[in-house]
Image (spheres, rainbow, N blue to C red):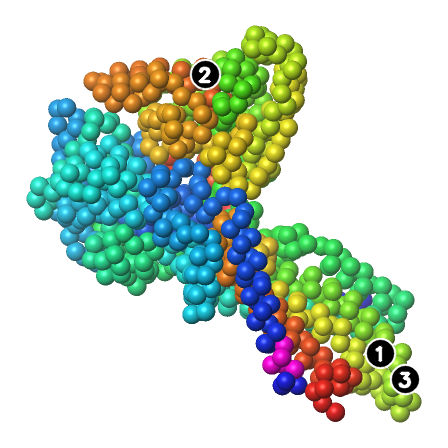
Amino acid sequence: MKALLFIAPLLLALAACSDYESNVSSGNREGILHWGNGAEPAELDPHIVTGLPEHSLMAALFEGLVAKNPHTLAVEPAVAQSWQVSDDGRVYRFAIRPSARWSNGEPITAEDFRWSWYRALQPGLGNPYAYMFAPIVNASAYASGELTDFSKVGIQVLDTLTLQVTLSNPTPFFLQLLDHYATYPVHRATIEARGAIDERGTRWTRVEHFVGNGPFTLKEWSLNKAIVVAKSLTYWDSDTVKLKQIVFHPIGNIATEERMFRAGQLHYTYDVPTAKIERYRVEQPELLRISPYLGTYFYRINTRLPHLQDIRVRQALSLAVDRESIVSYVTGAGELAAYTITPPGTLAYVAQPIAGFNPDRARAQLAAAGYPNGAGFPVTEILYNSSEAHRKIAVAIQQMWKRELNIDVVLANQDWKVFLAAQTNGDYQLSRASWIGDYVDPNSFLDMWIEGGGNNRTGWSNAEFEHLVLEVAPSAATQAARYDAFRRAETILLQEAPIIVIYTYVSKHLIHPSLRGFPANIMNHPSFKHMSLHRAEPEI
Amino acid sequence: MLRFILGRLLQAIPVLLVVITVTFFLVHSVPGGPFDADRAVGPAVMKALNSYYRLDLPLWQQYLHYLGDLASGDLGPSFKYPGRSVGEMIAAGLPATAELGFYALLVALGIGISSGVIAALRPNTAQDYIPMGLAMIGICMPAFLLGPLLVLVFGINLEWVPVSGWGGMPGDKVLPSLTLGAGYAAYVARLSRGGMLEVLSQDYMRTARAKGLAPWQIVLKHGLRGGLIPVVAFLGPAFAGLLTGSFVVETLFQIPGLGRFYVEAAFNRDYTMIMGTTILFAAAIIVFNLAADVLASALDPRLRQSRGGGQ
């Protein structure tokens, strides 16, 4: 009873705290967007970072030669106000916008881009996205250290405001790469004042030194607490920018993030806990946004192993996976069953889907490979990185294969880094995998399957596939011919089945109704300069 | 007493060295490295990264380099956060973590000692069973359950306090302090009940009663001093744990503290961060255990004599 004596004052103290205004309410009034941003960003240097939390920050703080339309993802002028492409599709000439400025007010020149790309390609810098420059003549050779003379790379300054880029092959998606943060410009004087050109982790990205060129500039960076960016007054299109500030909240736990959203502390969540999706669907569907995402969930098959070398075995495994059941009953967030590695909606590219769930054909293929009714098939292991979601999918597939093919599969999970090392070393039989496109083009999903490619990891190779992807598609005269080459290549890949595609990802977010100007798009690309907040919406 | 403290601090040096050495070789022996990524890093990039972080050297050379840097007070650069040094990140996270730990300790001691003493005064009655039952629930209920429950009731339904944050809004420190303190309060309650029960049956307590002292004087002046010795012994490691962070509570409430570094550094193979946080925790354990021993000596003259530190 006397415990109440201690609890009562605590409750009173709690009640006394209740006089606070939610972030959403104050943010709507003051034009401050509260954005759930996943994790603490590793860095704010566009030539060093990878990852989605960093992607959003880069989109606010920097801008490339071009930008993506938030609705269609079509390329639009940004720092470059226009460009010309040579008839052979290999030479791009960009006219830099005379009004483009750094956040310190200095004008942006063609030389700024040349130097920035020179830095991005320094072998010593360790830029994980250096391959974004691969279409440019000699860029890969310079990045790998084979070539040391940067003047041989196809990047030239013609005059203060004209930059010319020469490509090895016509590359229809090249302009899209210029909106990837690896190709964003960085401010030379700021970087050189803090260290060498290829020095990692110098302090140039700290608030007191930072210079960017995006619609927002860095105002505060409190480790694990918040990154605050404020509207840049020197940005060339600042009239379009409606938000005064954005507060990026690094929230590693999605359950915490969902509670923060419910309490009015966030306008936007990075993710939604799967268990909560159904409740939002039923009770507050206006807050939930689930839209297709440019990513595919699949299993790699280690084709170096004797029993998995046989194409018929791999096809049998693929045919016995009931993808519709997996997306309906296991993942449950609206994912799409996948029958191609390239997600639907990759511009106008449409791949030829593989055959879906067909247990009879699966059994026939397995029998033809020498395992009638699964007899004699070695016990095979599915490897996944420790996660409840991956485990559920693996259990479902394990049961499907047992039921349809009568083969025994065991499950194994590993810590993320151990799992990655096992994949890279080929130390697995079947392993869970995923791929998110870097740009909206089939190339982003297909060029990884060439022999010895760092992301292949299956041991599979096919001469015809490589010919189509590396030679026919790049030299195709028209987009239709190019897509045709990719379609044929993708069909080879899917039929030979070194991978079993399972589903296309969706992006899942909770979005407060007061946030406008943020249409869903397949890359989930936020264009902060088009976003605005409206106070009229009722509180949730 | 001074000699005792100095002796213990000197003993700490080889202990820390063993901790550093074992941890260093253990973390480097785990499969998977800091730069393994879903999206394969090209050989040129991998070479540059390994060279920058000295991972291309033989392990024993890396170890000697690390010891050399450590001797000059440098915990090295973080592998995961290239622009940050481990020392800087620990310094940035420590204030919030230490503040949270301090409030949680106040909660633990305030609730724990009072309910323990109340229970001990009338053992095996309702006055004993109710607080001890609550303490048992407190011990059994993990922070990842208690925290969201408190948030649901006081943060979302009643809207009395913010559901997360630290120092940004009034009242946002209340729920994390309660959540972290509750588990410790339960231990403190059981320890102080046990300690008090033992003390209350001592001869000198009977003497105090015979002298006609008021019951509150007997308990507070004579009883607590001896009754709290088990609590003080528990406080050393508890304080070290509280002041170096709680992954669960800091993650649940979005507190910019140290706790998350312990777990995330291991997942990320952020070698220098694993080393830095381990050294910090080991040092905190050593210092607070020592402080607990000194405090126990002050409370119990028998301990003082056995350590040769007083009359």
Residue A96 x %, y %:
14, 43
Total residue callouts = 3
Protein chain holding label 1: B
Q: Quadrant of the C terminus of chain B?
A: bottom right
Circle 1 sits on which residue? Answer: B199
Q: CA distance from mark 2 to mark 1?
A: 79 Å
* Distance Cα–Cα, label 3 vs label 2: 87 Å
Q: Residue at x 61, y 34 (%)?
A: A412
Question: Is A57 left or right of B216, judged from the image as shown?
Answer: left
Residue B228 image position (x, y, % from top left) = 76, 76
The residue to which callout 3 is attached is B203
Q: Amino acid at mark 2?
A: Glu
Q: Is residue A12 visible?
A: no
What are the residue bounds of the magenta stretch? B4-8
- Please, what is the dominant secondary structure of the magenta stretch? helix
Q: Which residue is mark 2?
A: A496
- Nearer the camera: disc 3 or disc 2: 2
Q: CA distance from mark 1 to mark 3?
A: 9 Å
Chain of the residue displaying label 3: B
- Amino acid at dot 3: Asp
Mark 1, Cα crowd under 10 Å, few <14 / some 14-19 / many 20+, is many
